[in-house]
Image (spheres, rainbow, N blue to C red):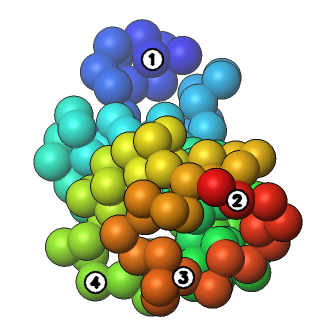
Amino acid sequence: MLIDRWAGRVPKTIDELVELPGVGRKTANLVVTLGYGKPGICVDIHVHRICHRFGWVRTKTPDQTERVLRDKLPSAWWIPINETLVRHGQQVCKPISPICSVCPVDRDCPKKGVTRRR
């Protein structure tokens, strides 16, 4: 498909990238941000979960969360928000039992959906 449709070049837009088999919005955003330096928001499960816990979104899928964040955040924050929230989700705001006792935003976090924490 890359050869036939784009002469062997990786597409530069999210809409074109998601047409490729196996490429979803998260990967497409990653390609445009890291490959082309364009603004994008990579929303994986960590970003999706944390945005819910913070009360920023009420969505069912990471793709829906991405769309809400695009509307709410200035584009200058789009790239850094992913790295920041992914790292926070991996190290502190874990899926089953977040470590709220070491969280730098614990006092301001509404902890939506959190039933067990450390």
Label 1 Cα crowd, 10 Å radius (few <14 / some 14-19 / many 20+): few
**Residue 109 on image: x %, y %:** 54, 82
Residue receiving disc 3: 109
At label 4, counting other C-alpha atoms closer than 10 Å, the crowd grade (few under 14, some 14-19, many 20 or more) is few
Asked if residue 13 shows in the view, the reply is no
Q: Earlier in the sequence, mark 1 or mark 4?
A: 1
Where is residue 70, by image quadrant? bottom left
Instruction: Residue under label 1, please give it.
Output: 2
Instruction: Check disc 4 and give the amino acid type.
Output: Pro
Q: Secondary structure at mark 2?
A: loop
SS at mark 3 in the image: loop
**Where does the N terminus fall, quadrant-wise?**
top right
Q: In the image, residue 79 lies at what x, y percent?
A: 27, 57
SS class, disc 4: loop
Residue found 73% across the figure and 78% down from its top: 112
- Tell me which residue sits at (70%, 59%) in the image: 117
Q: Residue at x 15, y 48 (%)?
A: 37
Q: Amino acid at mark 3?
A: Cys
Q: The disc labelled 1 sits on which kind of residue? A: Leu
Q: Quadrant of the C terminus?
A: bottom right
Any mark on residue 117, and which? 2
